[in-house]
Image (cartoon, rainbow, N blue to C red):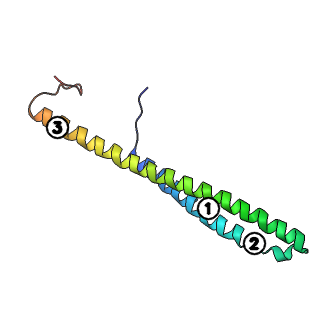
Amino acid sequence: MRFSVEPTSARRVVRQAGDRVEELTDVVREARGVDAGDAGSLLVGGAVSVFFEDRAEAVEKLRTRAGSVVRAAGEVIEVYEAGDREMAQETEALARRGEVSGRGGLA
């Protein structure tokens, strides 16, 4: 099996994922900002507040993990591109010395 990565497309996907992660920050803020006073009863309002605070904590953990994955994916793309540049430089150096066959391999 052969894999091929198009860094430009991969970067676009990682950027879009990063945008979605940032949207989770807004979700957390909104969940923590729920006004439970509109619930009509102190007991129900308290339960609603606890529920949304718990959900906010869960989403915050998800946002943190997703952010780590997005950063790691960005680093992987950079390493992939650096490897491509290094291989290209090595192949070019071998070609200059006449050590590379026309089929993409060593002579």
Please name whichever residue, 77 or 38, is drawn nearer the observer in this view of the structure: 38
**Residue sticking out furthest to the top:** 107
List the residue tagged with mark 3: 92
The disc label shown at residue 24, or none: 1
Relative to 5, is 31 above or below? Answer: below
Q: How many badges with numbers are in the image? A: 3
**Residue sticking out furthest to the bottom:** 37
Q: Which residue is pictured at 42% across the width and 33% down the height?
A: 3
Relative to 9, is 39 above or below? Answer: below
10 Å crowding of disc 2: few (<14), some (14-19), many (20+): some
Give the residue type at disc 2.
Val
Question: Is residue 43 rendered to the left or right of residue 29?
Answer: right
Q: Work out how far the residue at label 1 is from the one at label 2, CA to CA, in angstroms.
A: 16 Å
Q: Work out how far the residue at label 1 is from the one at label 3, CA to CA, in angstroms.
A: 46 Å
Q: Position of residue 31 (x, y in %)?
A: 71, 67
Please name whichever residue, 87 or 69, is drawn nearer the observer in this view of the structure: 69
Q: Which residue is pictured at 52% across the width and 56% down the height?
A: 67
